Amino acid sequence: QVQLVESGGGLVQAGGSLRLSCAASGSIFRIGAMGWYRQAPGTQRELVATLTTGGTTNFADSVKGRFTISRDNAKNTVSLQMDNLKPEDTAVYYCNANILVRLGAWNNYWGQGTQVTVSS
């Protein structure tokens, strides 16, 4: 069993910062790419940022230059530093990871989501 648990969401004023963290736990043998997605009410879930084990990043155009993604492979965590937040960043943010479970196969996992609200 694998779990992804996010933390760090909350309410912030426009121009402020938040840092999201996600910890993977369970019968993990190896973790591949990790990332963050978000979903605002009435919209589809969209990619925010991803980070491969080799260090390659991919960001949505809307967050480039404002968000930073990092990971700690020893701790099985991924973080998203969000600066200069805008009201349009308001959404539920989900952690995502490709994980190879012990004695198993690669699967894609999602966290439960954490709310980020940016007030104008």
Image (cartoon, rainbow, N blue to C red):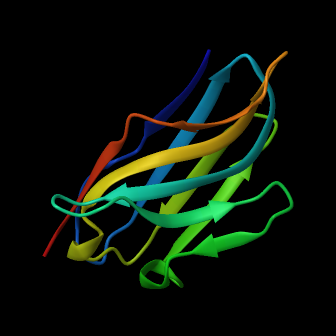
Report the side of 42 relative to 2 (left or right). Answer: left
Using the image as rendered, state which of residue 83 and residue 111 is in the foreground: 111
Quadrant of image for the C terminus: bottom left
Dividing the picture into quadrants, the one containing residue 7 is top left
Dividing the picture into quadrants, the one containing residue 59 is bottom right
> Residue 37, how many percent across, how many down?
45, 57
Dividing the picture into quadrants, the one containing residue 23 is top right
Quadrant of image for the N terminus: top right
Total tally of numbered discs in the picture: 0
> Residue 74, how many percent across, how many down?
82, 36
Residue 60 against residue 18 in the figure, above or below:
below
Residue 29 against residue 69 in the figure, above or below:
above
Q: Which residue is found at the position 38% from the left and 66% from the top?
A: 17
Residue 87 against residue 38 in the figure, above or below:
below
Report the side of 66 relative to 104 (left or right). Answer: left
Q: Which residue is found at the position 81% from the left and 64% from the top?
A: 55
Q: Which residue is found at the position 82% from the left and 54% from the top?
A: 53
> Residue 89, how many percent across, how many down?
30, 70
Report the side of 86 relative to 25 (left or right). Answer: left
> Residue 52, how many percent across, how many down?
76, 58
Q: Which residue is found at the position 42% from the left and 83% from the top?
A: 62
Residue 72 against residue 47 in the figure, above or below:
above
